[in-house]
Image (spheres, rainbow, N blue to C red):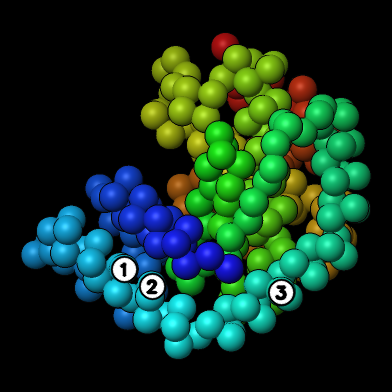
């Protein structure tokens, strides 16, 4: 539970994704979406976000704390099995060294910072167990990007030849969705995955079929990243 980190998260997300109206609408709770109006300058928008964040943490402090503690407890019950499965998926590829830190958030999307090893998860959600699944999802990104940096010399912001700018991001998200739909993974979290991003359904269907046919991370990613 860290109000300061969550506020920085809001500032970064709204400023970085300023041209993507859909992402911003997903990110912001309905009661603060007014800041998407073009009449708000960046300074005004940041002030509204600061006021909203401060008010929410003040009025829902106990609720956020309880949600964060529950997320920690749920993760403690699943992390051993999760890391064991990820170890098999990535052929015992070592996790990047460092301290991984997850922050509960009052916002509706859960960005990560690969270099800082930080990420966000919901302190509560209408879908039960989503915090636990979000933590697993974000952690999977850390090892995925480390793996492809070693095998393909690709970074998170790399652009592949003859591919859209967001292609690598799409592959990473679809890969996570494919893993989340895999029965051994689903068994750990006890619920169905929450799907994939709109516009990546065809990629998801194809990659899922490839993984179902052969569970080999190298053969799978070679099909999508080898140039």
Q: Which mark is residue 150?
A: none
Q: Which residue is mark 1?
A: 50
Tally the marks. 3
Q: Residue at x 46, y 78 (%)?
A: 57
Q: Tell me the quadrant of the picture where the N terminus can be found.
A: bottom right
Tell me: 169 left or right of 215: left
Q: Which residue is mark 3?
A: 69
Q: Residue at x 84, y 51 (%)?
A: 82
Q: Residue at x 50, y 85 (%)?
A: 60
Label 2 neighbour load within 10 Å: few <14, some 14-19, many 20+? many
Q: Which residue is mark 2?
A: 53
Is residue 36 positioned above or below 173 on the image? below
Is residue 161 positioned above or below 63 on the image? above
Query: Marks 3 and 1: CB-CB under 8 Å?
Result: no
Label whose residue precedes the other's in the sequence (3 or 2): 2
Q: SS class of the residue under badge 1?
A: helix
Query: Marks 3 and 2: CB-CB under 8 Å?
Result: no
Query: Marks 1 and 2: CB-CB under 8 Å?
Result: yes
Query: 170 or 34: nearer the eye?
Result: 34
Q: Distance between the Cα atoms at labels 1 and 2?
A: 5 Å
Query: 168 or 109: nearer the eye?
Result: 109
């Amino acid at each position: 539970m860290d109000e300061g980190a969550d506020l920085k998260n809001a500032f970064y997300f709204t400023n970085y994704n300023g041209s993507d109206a859909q992402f911003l609408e997903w990110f912001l709770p309905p009661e603060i979406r007014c800041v998407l109006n073009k009449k708000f300058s960046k300074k005004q928008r940041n002030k509204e976000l600061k006021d909203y964040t401060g008010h929410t943490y003040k009025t829902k402090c106990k609720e956020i704390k309880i949600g964060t503690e529950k997320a920690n407890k749920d993760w403690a019950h699943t992390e051993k099995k999760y890391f064991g499965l990820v170890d098999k998926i990535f052929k015992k590829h070592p996790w990047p060294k460092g301290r991984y830190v997850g922050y509960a958030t009052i916002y509706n999307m859960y960005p990560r910072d690969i270099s800082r090893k930080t990420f966000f998860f919901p302190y509560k959600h209408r879908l039960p167990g989503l915090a636990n699944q979000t933590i697993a999802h974000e952690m999977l990104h850390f090892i995925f990007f480390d793996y492809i940096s070693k095998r393909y010399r690709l970074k998170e912001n790399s652009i592949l030849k003859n591919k859209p700018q967001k292609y690598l991001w799409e592959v990473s998200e679809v890969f996570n969705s494919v893993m989340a739909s895999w029965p051994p993974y689903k068994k750990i979290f006890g619920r169905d995955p929450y799907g994939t991003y709109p516009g990546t359904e065809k990629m998801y269907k194809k990659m899922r079929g490839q993984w179902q046919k052969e569970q080999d991370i190298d053969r799978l990613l070679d099909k999508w990243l080898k140039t």
